[in-house]
Image (spheres, rainbow, N blue to C red):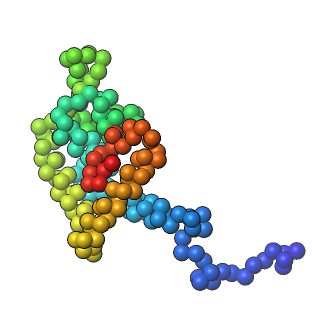
Amino acid sequence: MAAETAQEPRTASQCPAVPSAVLDGPVSHAISRVARLHRIAAGRALRDLGLHPGQEFLMMHLWDSGAVRQSELIKAVGLDPSTVTKMLQRLEQSGHVRRRPDPSDRRASLVEATDASCGLLVEVRRAWGELEHQTLEGLEDAERTELARLLGKVEASLCTELTRSAAECEATYKGPGAC
């Protein structure tokens, strides 16, 4: 019986380059791998600034928009409210944001970037510039343009598919090629 179930060891040429479960989705698999690596690289750059991944998007929104209600910030970044609350607690402890009651509705909180966070803005821009360089190193200008165009189309397709009303797309950070 044991002889019937025993198999010859597989050689390298018999093993698929990707898991068999993703053979019908090689592009999705590639996007997933690239997104994971990009997030790791971003995390390393942000760690040097005392930020955790995702916090820079909260700060970017606050730097661009000024004081906003916490509920509006949650919608703008498209994250779970408990995640945003935890991020804001950390950013508040580090002196980058402050929360205060909304004068027009005391039940709501306004969140704003502090003056002390202005130096962080320069550092986040620098970190994202370095990440951009690292990410696109080896691509020619035309390839970079084409990649941004194609990723914009992929994003628009996913936004349309995931939310027929496009509410999620409205809530996500708007970058090049955004829906």
Q: Which residue occupies 12% across, 43% down?
A: 118
Pick the front one: 95 or 74:
74
Relative to residue 14, is residue 25 depicted above or below? above
Q: Which residue occupies 27% across, 75% down?
A: 138
Quadrant showing the N terminus: bottom right
Position of 43 compared to 5: left or right?
Answer: left
Q: Is residue 89 visible?
A: no
User: Percent position (x, y) of residue 159?
Assistant: 41, 47
User: Percent position (x, y) of residue 53?
Assistant: 32, 49
User: Percent position (x, y) of residue 72?
Assistant: 30, 31
**Location of residue 177 by image quarter:** bottom left
Residue at the outermost right position: 1
Position of 4 compared to 123: left or right?
Answer: right
Q: Is residue 162 visible?
A: yes
Q: Which residue occupies 27% across, 24% down?
A: 109
Position of 39 compared to 8: left or right?
Answer: left
**Location of residue 17 by image quarter:** bottom right
User: Percent position (x, y) of residue 114?
Assistant: 15, 36
Pick the front one: 101 or 172:
172
Q: Which residue occupies 34% across, 35% down?
A: 75
Position of 174 compared to 117: left or right?
Answer: right
Q: How many marks?
A: 0
